[in-house]
Image: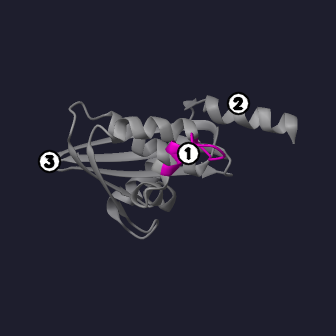
Amino acid sequence: MLIEIFTDGAAQGNPGRGGYGIVMRYGKHVKEFSQGYRHTTNNRMELLAVIVALEQLTKPNLEVLVTTDSKYVMDAVVKNWVFGWEKKGFKKKKNPDLWKRFLKIYRQHKVNFKWVKGHNMHTENERCDQLAVAAAEGPDKLIDHYYEEKEKTKSLFD
């Protein structure tokens, strides 16, 4: 049976406060997940949403359809860019920590992607957006350690 995953990321300021939202559906079962971060980017949240959703799957080799409004995530996989980046050690690519984490879990399943236009009345995408924004605005934000360290180091040498 197909597992449907719907994801969205948000960042207020980009970079700024961020969050992701996930809706997962397996038959009649539906689960929602979200998490906020104190300082991150929209693309990191879009990618992290997909990663976290795939990490929820407890059995290998599942058939999964990820629906996202992120061209960044979808194109990187569907157009095979991420596999080229991997071969080059993610040299000069953004978010290598998340892409490595993504590839590890992605390879455990049969994952397809579907793109939907954001803010276009797609029920699950709208719900994911609500979850992501609420998480970004909420009180229980985590620290995106990789991003914040990178930003701190970058500012020392700019």
Q: CA distance from mark 1 to mark 2?
A: 14 Å
Residues at badges 2 and 3 in contact (C-beta under 8 Å)?
no
Drawn side of residue 21 relative to residue 55, left or right: right
Disc 3 secondary structure class: loop
Between residues 87 and 108, which one lies in front from this camera angle? 87
Mark 3 neighbour density, 10 Å: few (under 14) some (14–19) many (20 or more): few
Residue span colored magenta: 84-95
Amino acid, disc 1: Arg
Q: On the image, which quarter does residue 62 sit in?
A: top left
Which residue has dot 2 on it? Answer: 149
Q: Quadrant of the C terminus?
A: top right
Mark 2 neighbour density, 10 Å: few (under 14) some (14–19) many (20 or more): few
Which residue has dot 1 on it? Answer: 44
Amino acid, disc 2: Glu
Q: Position of residue 149 (x, y in %)?
A: 70, 30
Q: On the image, which quarter does residue 32 sit in?
A: top left
Drawn side of residue 26 relative to residue 146, left or right: left
